[in-house]
């Protein structure tokens, strides 16, 4: 059954939130639903999703509910606050005896234990324009007792049809070369990584725009002789649509990713990866990262790389990115992907949850 969805997304920084919300909206549209994506900053969609998506309308952040009222499902993504007048419209529709919208709070991704405990719990509203309504928590996650991960229905077919060697040839990467993608904030061990790759004539660093490119340029500026004597090939990439980003992850031998959306895409890619988790001032991200590495069953070398890359440890040396290390990381990534593929994807679970509560 086709439903109408209102999906709310406020862009905090780095466009990770809008990236997740767009993938969800586009997949809802692909499965025959109608989506209004309400956002306070849609600018990233000009390059992230230039073609749009069937069934998806992008709307500016509302001050009130639209004339036709709220949809069948209202999703508040990542703790953003739905405008009070929109909430009042939800309450009015519920009070009028109509089929009330199902209100869902889509939470951030984590492997910590609280996710299984809190997933699908109700949160009754006791005050404000939504007093008397119930909001439901929906937690993405890595285990069957969570809300799963976003995975498009056509993802496996797209990967199977992808010509990895052709992609690498177009980008000047020989079959035996080491291709490393870099999508990061400002990792403490970036200088170590560049110093390790620099002497390798077979290494190619593919740097995404924004903070990753700025971090690399800053590192190079502090070592002006470095680029004159070393051999590393560095490509500074332009912004790209989400499917193009996926293809880069499929083509590279190591993916250094950041945030939530790119972590999930790296898992589906099945290549070795390192996650630069979003840093929090109280270091709460340390526990989140360690919980993920436990779920991943990461080998010791991958744990050490993560610890140094994320600043959990200092005064140590990054593991060497040699063939044996990458082979061990590859086996870990493929095993993790296989576990995830045995589970239902986030949208399938979300649709089941909606059907159960409606």
Image (tube, rainbow, N blue to C red):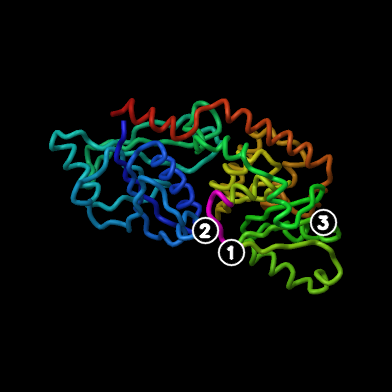
Sequence-first tag of 3 and 2:
2
The quarter in which the C terminus is drawn is top left
| Residue at figure coordinates x 37%, y 59% from the top left | 40
Sequence-first tag of 1 and 3:
3
Percent position of residue 153, x then y: 49, 35
Local SS, label 3 = helix
Q: Is residue 336 above or below residue 325?
A: above
| Residue at figure coordinates x 68%, y 53% from the top left | 181
CA separation in Å, label 3 and label 2: 28 Å
Local SS, label 1 = loop
Magenta-colored span: 238-244
Please state if 80 lies on the left or on the right of 4 as rendered. Answer: right
| Residue at figure coordinates x 33%, y 25% from the top left | 356
Residue placed under numbered mark 3 in the picture? 196
Please state if 184 lies on the left or on the right of 34 as rendered. Answer: right
Q: Report how many numbered discs are placed on residues in the image.
A: 3
Q: Which mark is residue 14?
A: 2
Residue 179 part of the magenta-drawn span: no
Sequence-first tag of 1 and 2:
2
Q: Which mark is residue 210?
A: 1
Local SS, label 2 = loop
**Is 347 or 216 nearer to us in this picture?**
347
Residues packed near mark 2 inside 10 Å, few (<14), some (14 to 19) or many (20 plus): some
- The quarter holding residue 162 reads top right
Q: Residue furthest left?
A: 96
Residues packed near mark 3 inside 10 Å, few (<14), some (14 to 19) or many (20 plus): some
Please state if 194 lies on the left or on the right of 208 as rendered. Answer: right
């Amino acid at each position: 059954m086709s439903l109408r969805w209102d999906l709310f997304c406020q862009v905090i920084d780095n466009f990770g939130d809008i990236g997740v919300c767009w993938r969800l909206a586009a997949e809802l549209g692909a499965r025959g639903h109608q989506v209004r994506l309400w956002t306070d900053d849609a600018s990233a969609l000009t390059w992230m999703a230039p073609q749009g998506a069937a069934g998806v309308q992008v709307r500016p952040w509302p001050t009130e509910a639209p004339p036709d009222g709220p949809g069948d499902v209202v999703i508040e993504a990542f703790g953003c606050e739905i405008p009070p007048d929109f909430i009042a419209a939800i309450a009015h529709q519920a009070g009028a005896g109509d089929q009330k919208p199902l209100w869902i709070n889509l939470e951030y991704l984590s492997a910590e234990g609280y996710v299984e405990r809190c997933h699908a719990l109700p949160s009754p509203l006791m005050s404000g324009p939504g007093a008397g309504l119930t909001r439901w928590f929906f937690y993405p996650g890595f285990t069957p007792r969570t809300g799963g991960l976003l995975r498009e229905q056509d993802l496996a077919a797209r990967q199977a049809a992808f010509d990895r060697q052709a992609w690498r040839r177009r980008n000047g990467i020989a079959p035996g070369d080491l291709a490393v993608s870099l999508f990061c904030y400002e990792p403490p061990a970036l200088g170590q990584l560049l110093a390790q790759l620099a002497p390798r004539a077979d290494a190619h660093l593919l740097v995404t725009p924004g903070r990753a490119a700025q971090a690399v340029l800053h590192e190079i500026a502090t070592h002006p002789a470095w680029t004159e004597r070393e051999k590393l090939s560095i490509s500074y990439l332009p912004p790209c649509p989400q499917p193009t980003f996926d293809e880069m992850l499929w083509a590279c031998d190591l993916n250094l990713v950041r945030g939530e959306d790119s972590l999930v895409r790296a898992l589906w890619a099945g290549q070795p990866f390192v996650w630069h988790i979003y840093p929090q001032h109280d270091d709460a991200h340390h526990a989140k990262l360690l919980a993920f590495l436990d779920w991943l069953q990461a080998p010791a070398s991958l744990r050490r790389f993560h610890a140094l890359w994320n600043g959990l440890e200092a005064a140590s040396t990054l593991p060497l990115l040699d063939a044996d290390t990458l082979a061990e990381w590859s086996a870990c990534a493929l095993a993790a992907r296989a576990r995830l593929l045995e589970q239902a994807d986030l949208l399938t679970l979300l649709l089941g949850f909606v059907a159960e509560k409606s």
